[in-house]
Image (spheres, rainbow, N blue to C red):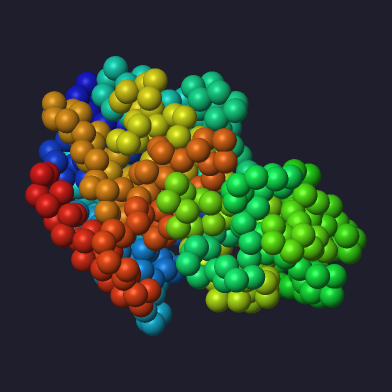
């Protein structure tokens, strides 16, 4: 399927197109396989490459936001996806939104017209051997059929997920620690590992009623309303009975207040998301609620009235590998050098995050062909934050994530006011990414 010294890419979405472009721009021949229009996934309907399935928004374009910073880093690294997105943009305030038809058309034209890229419109049913050159698997989150079966044999059943249940993440210093207390369930000594937001009976029952009446995201045509009992949306649990959450993720047992000894009626527990404890996960709060509803309701939780959300909760069909067990920082499989996993399949969420992983995979696959060493982005950058999330997270609790500042290392030195932290991070990251880009 692939010729010696060339790169094979499976999947013509954002990650596959970006990877192909980056490799070809470095003088390496690429064969890009895309099954459309021969066969469509349940979510796709356009024959073009780079189809945007859901929203036409690529989120914030402001460089003092994590999403905007990632975009600017990609621009500095010569991203095709960002070039086409900028050419196809439509008015959307500070967000970058695109005309999806124009975006797909221009991306397809750029890839298909590149002299070193051959686009093959056929379905790939098994992953090629890397003895004929590097392979980049960027087949997307709806991977299924024989290709998914083959990936399962390579990774093992325990390391490939087909269902994505994500709880929200909040910024640690946006929490009110005069209300929230630290305690692990049943721990008698020490401060405990969890932050606890206590609720009395009246507040709890108002919260449950609000959950049951809140607006949820409609299911896509390709999704079925089938949830695992172990990861039910909290709004589904709420309508099963007034005490369901109190016997589930909001169970107060063993969480008496360490100072007063009072036992709350219910508790929302927060667990540290990173070693630095700059971000906290709402334990058991996977949800299909819309993002505005999540922010409105979760800010009624005691101590979270001013919470800054780094990631919102979601539940949807999404195939991804357990990256911390399987991938190295160049996005190659640890046990199969030369096989790269890119896009959402690698364990990131979002259009731009997927394209960014394609960009890095394309660069490093090309460097393998050219006999050069792989490159890993500097630690303070958005690209490195995503790579660290994929490869340095606890594999037991690993979940896909959008880029957010909670994934970055803490800012060192003097205390930096919240309103300028994003700008400070951007200045550091963009200086480093310019130096990094000078290497290729």
Quarter of the image with the C terminus in it: top left
Q: Nearer the viewer, residue 89 or 280?
A: 280
Q: Residue at x 15, y 49 (%)?
A: 436
- In the image, 126 versus 297, the foreground residue is 297
Query: Residue 3 appears at what percent x and percent y?
Result: 24, 23
Residue pictured at 12% horizontal, 52% vertical: 435
Q: Along the horizontal axis of the image, is 225 left or right of 130?
A: right
Residue 248 place in picture, x, y as percent: 79, 51
Picture layout, residue 109 above or below residue 307? above
> Residue 36: in sight, yes or no?
no
Question: Residue 314's image quarter?
Answer: bottom right
Q: Residue furthest top?
A: 131
89 or 191: nearer the eye? 191
Q: Which residue is drawn at 63% across and 65% down?
A: 180
Which x, y percent locates residue 131? 29, 17
Residue at far left of view: 438
Residue drawn at point x = 31 percent, y = 48 percent? 384
Looking at the image, residue 73 sits to the left or right of residue 122; the answer is left
Residue 33 falls in image quadrant = top left
Q: How many labels does the image show?
A: 0
Q: In which quarter of the image is the N terminus?
A: top left
Is 295 rendered above or below residue 317? below
Query: Residue 15: image x %, image y %?
Result: 36, 47
| Residue 272 makes an appearance in the image | yes
């Amino acid at each position: 399927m692939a010729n010696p010294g060339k790169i094979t890419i499976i999947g013509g979405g954002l990650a596959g197109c970006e990877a192909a472009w980056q490799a070809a721009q470095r003088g390496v021949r690429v064969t890009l396989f895309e099954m459309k229009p021969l066969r469509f996934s349940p979510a796709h309907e356009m024959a073009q490459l780079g189809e945007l399935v859901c929203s036409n928004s690529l989120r914030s374009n402001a460089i003092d936001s994590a999403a905007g910073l990632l975009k600017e880093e990609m621009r500095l690294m010569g991203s095709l996806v960002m070039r086409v997105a900028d050419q196809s943009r439509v008015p959307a305030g500070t967000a970058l939104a695109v005309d999806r038809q124009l975006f797909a058309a221009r991306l397809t034209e750029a890839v298909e017209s590149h002299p070193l890229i051959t686009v093959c419109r056929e379905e790939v049913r098994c992953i090629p051997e890397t003895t004929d050159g590097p392979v980049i698997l960027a087949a997307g989150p709806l991977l299924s059929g024989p290709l998914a079966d083959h990936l399962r044999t390579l990774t093992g059943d325990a390391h490939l997920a087909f269902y994505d249940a994500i709880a929200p993440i909040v910024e640690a210093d946006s929490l009110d620690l005069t209300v929230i207390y630290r305690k692990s369930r049943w721990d008698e000594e020490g401060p405990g590992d969890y932050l606890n937001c206590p609720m009395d009976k009246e507040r709890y029952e108002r919260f449950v009623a609000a959950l049951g009446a809140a607006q949820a995201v409609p299911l896509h045509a390709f999704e079925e309303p089938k949830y695992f009992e172990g990861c039910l949306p909290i709004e589904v649990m709420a309508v099963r009975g007034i005490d369901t959450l109190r016997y589930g993720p909001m169970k107060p047992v063993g969480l008496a207040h360490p100072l007063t000894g009072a036992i709350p009626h219910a508790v929302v527990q927060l667990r540290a998301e990173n070693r630095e404890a700059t971000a906290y996960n709402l334990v058991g709060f996977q949800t299909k609620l819309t993002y505005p509803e999540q922010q409105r309701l979760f800010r009624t939780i005691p101590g979270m009235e001013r919470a800054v959300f780094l990631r919102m909760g979601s539940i949807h069909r999404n195939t991804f590998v357990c990256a911390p067990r399987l991938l190295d920082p160049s996005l190659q499989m640890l046990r199969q050098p030369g096989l790269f996993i890119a896009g959402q399949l690698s364990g990131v969420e979002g259009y731009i995050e997927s394209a960014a992983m394609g960009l890095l995979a394309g660069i490093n696959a090309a460097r393998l062909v050219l006999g050069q060493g792989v490159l890993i982005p500097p630690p303070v950058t958005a690209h490195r934050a995503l790579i660290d999330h994929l490869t340095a997270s606890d594999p037991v609790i690993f979940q896909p994530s959008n880029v957010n500042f909670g994934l970055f290392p803490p800012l060192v030195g003097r205390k930096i006011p919240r309103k300028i932290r994003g700008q400070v991070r951007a200045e550091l990251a963009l200086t480093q990414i310019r130096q990094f880009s000078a290497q290729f």
